[in-house]
Image (cartoon, rainbow, N blue to C red):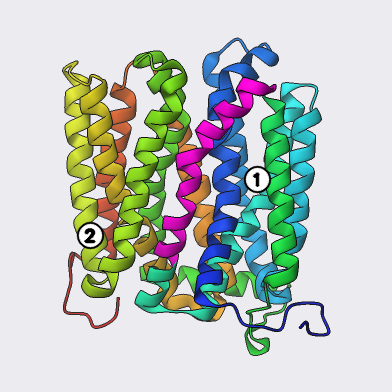
Amino acid sequence: MQNRAGAPAHALSTPELVAMVAALSALNALAIDVMLPALPDIGRSFALVNDNDRQLVIVCYVALFGVSQLIYGPLADAYGRRSVLIYALGLYTLGSVLCVIAPSFGLFLAARALQGVGAAATRVIATAVVRDLTEGRRMAQVMSMAMTLFMVVPIMAPGLGQLILLIAPWRWIFGALLIYALIVLVWTLTRLPETLKAEHRRAFSPRAIVSAYASVLRERQTVGYMIASVFITTCLFGYVTSSEQLYVDVFGLGKLFPVAFASVAIAISAGTFLNARLVMVHGMRRLSHTMAVAFTTVAALIALLAAIGAATFWPFIVLLALMFSMFGLIASNFSALAMEPVGAVAGSASALFGAVTASGGALLGGLVGRAFDGTPLPFALGLFLCGAATLITIAVTERGRLFDTARRAP
């Protein structure tokens, strides 16, 4: 059954909501991870001189993915979640087509940027839909469940990319992205109802946009956890942009690179799986603050091993997986804590949060990647510094009351 606007009139069940959020998130994850094994081939195809320039394939996408969210938030608050998402998926599809046919590296990067513009809506609207339908610890639980499900994608994506490369040129990877985008578009058209209540719609005008973003920026908790999320996201983006060079150039894994990458992705997935269960018992603050301390401690140990030349493959991968399992217990809670006070402008809040964290994380993560010097030391130092910055930020946000279990809410 559909309403007069063409949107399905049914309500999403919790399992379908989790699955749809995971599928939308996977669209973005695939656009980053599936091509990692193809970066050397892309560099050779476009005759790149500097190997670090291959990282621009990721950085251009993520940067536009971040910035574009700023416009999707007000659009989603004005015109609803569903219609904006449909148009954005069309842009992603167009970008995928252009990636397949781009004749030069410059045009290829522009096509990647267009993919990022389209994918930006998936981040904004997935979070806004969850905030429309849930709140508090329940929101953190739903987001963790969705993250657990979608984490299958970064586990499998590099292996899928490597499999495609065994039977076809690297451009076929973008053909696979095109097919997946079309599947998600059809699902959205047939199953996603409009979740924005009529009384919560806001005018799409410069004054309304400024007002919405201003109301978000007045919330200390939202701003604080948004900044903390930039630093913790930098660790993830720094890892993604550096992973191919670390595993292949430093540790000489060759075609076993997807296996190593998958091991860390499994660790993140395990963390998000545990978070969905633990957050209902311990709360978002206690859990995320504890894990942020542990994350930074392990990052310091990796940096120490790298500095003394003891960061051989097995200690490195084991500690890295341990550290990123804690990321899975931090990211969803930081996101939910940031969104908790701003339900009335969830679309704009989600957009601002996503834009700042994705763009900031991409910029700083790109700097971590560009610092690669043939050793794991710059990467390890970047992780430690960002972990320390995360702790400082949440301490300032909470006025020194870390692990505060006296609060009844989050």
> Viewed as shown, does residue 312 lie left or right of 338?
left
Quarter in which the C terminus is drawn: bottom left
> Viewed as shown, does residue 294 lie left or right of 231?
left
- Write the start and end of the magenta stretch as one range: 143-169
Magenta region, main secondary structure: helix
Does 321 sit above or below residue 268? Answer: above
Q: Name the residue under label 1.
A: 116
Does 184 sit above or below residue 364? Answer: below
Secondary structure of residue under mark 2:
helix
Which one is earlier in the sequence, the residue at label 1 or at label 2? 1
**Residue drawn at 64 percent across, 86 percent down:** 197
Specify the quadrant of the image occupied by residue 333: bottom left
Q: How crowded is mark 2: few (under 14 residues within 10 Å), some or many (20 or more)?
A: many
> Viewed as shown, does residue 105 lie left or right of 13?
right
Q: How many discs mark residues in the rendered view?
A: 2
| Of 279 and 375, the residue lying toward us | 279
Query: Spatial distance from mark 1 to mark 2, Cα to Cα?
Result: 31 Å
Name the amino acid, label 1. Answer: Gly
Q: Name the residue under label 2.
A: 289
Specify the quadrant of the image occupied by residue 62: top right
Does 194 sit above or below residue 59? Answer: below
**Residue drawn at 41 percent across, 33 percent down:** 261
Residue 289: where, in percent of width, then height?
Answer: 23, 59
